[in-house]
Image (cartoon, rainbow, N blue to C red):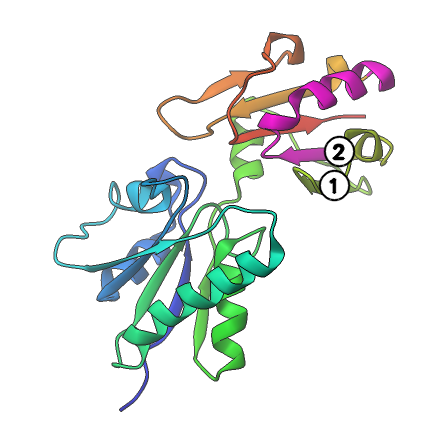
Amino acid sequence: MKKGILFGVGVGPGDPELMTVKAIKTIESCPCIAAPQTGGEKTLALDIASKAVNIEGKDILTLPFLMSRDKAAVSENHKEQAELIKSRLDEGIDVAMLNLGDVSIYSTFSYIMDILQSEGYEVIMISGVPSFCAVAAALRTGLTSMNKPLHIIPAGGMSPDEAFSLSGTKVLMKTGKAMPEVRAAAEKWGLSDKIMLVQNCGLENERICRNFNEAEDDISYFTTMIVGE
């Protein structure tokens, strides 16, 4: 029997209207939808997709991903989720695995892709709108210009001091818990008036802060900051 194909589908940052036509068509064509689940019962990517695609009658395969700093435990969890997807692929069923933003940027999908490709399964990636691009649009600002570097930095990837020492524009992703450290570093580097941010971009509880001082320390995990020079 011919094995199914795994499609990694980027659903964008939150607004279902930002889903691409190709993403919608791919989800429509796949009998099975693999939906990452984090933080208990949250299946945010599926919630977004369901507002743009009729998923009635689809086989919804929930993937409970572990949020932990224990690399061994996380690696084992990824293998477990890959096995769940393989159970459908081995039956010849195509699977659309949903991913917030784009499938190539700090994506959950990339870990599963690496496992399945190493075992000979066919994988196809469907790009999505990255969160930081949607954030820039919401803030009505450009991210970079000719010959200016752009740095995309995840929470925990480096300290705010290290990030602010880089030339060009800095994008700090998922910075909610790090807000006190970011604020202290911004004051140290004199960048408080160069920072804008968006919380929960594209979702119903979106909040736009064009003035960094408007933001509280207790902010959403899904907060993206744009730091100018």
Residue 44, which numbered label? none
Q: Quadrant of the N terminus?
A: bottom left
Which quadrant would residue 124 be assigned to in this image? bottom left
- How many residues crowd mark 2 within 10 Å: few (<14), some (14–19), many (20+)? many
Circle 2 SS class: strand
Residue 173 shown left or right of residue 153 in the figure = left
The magenta stretch spans residue 148: no
The earlier-in-sequence mark between 1 and 2 is 1
| Residue located beneath label 2 in the image | 169
Query: How far across and down, in percent of the image, does residue 148 sit?
Result: 81, 39
Q: CA distance from mark 1 to mark 2?
A: 5 Å
Residue lying furthest left in this view?
A: 57
What residue appears at the point 25 percent right and 81 percent down from the top-left corner? 91
Query: How far across and down, in percent of the image, does residue 7 sit?
Result: 39, 66
Circle 1 SS class: strand
The magenta stretch spans residue 182: yes
Which quadrant would residue 151 be assigned to in this image? top right
Total numbered labels placed on residues in the image: 2
Of the residues shown, which amino acid type is indicated by label 1?
A: Leu
Residue 202 higher or lower than 53, as above or below? above
Q: Is mark 1 in CB contact (under 8 Å) with mark 2?
A: yes
Residue 198 higher or lower than 89, as above or below? above
Q: Quadrant of the C terminus?
A: top right
What residue appears at the point 65 percent right and 37 percent down from the top-left corner? 155
| Residue located beneath label 1 in the image | 150
Of the residues shown, which amino acid type is indicated by label 2?
A: Thr
Q: Main secondary structure of the magenta part?
A: helix
Q: Which residues are the magenta region?
A: 170-190
Query: How far across and down, in percent of the image, does residue 83 sit?
Result: 38, 71
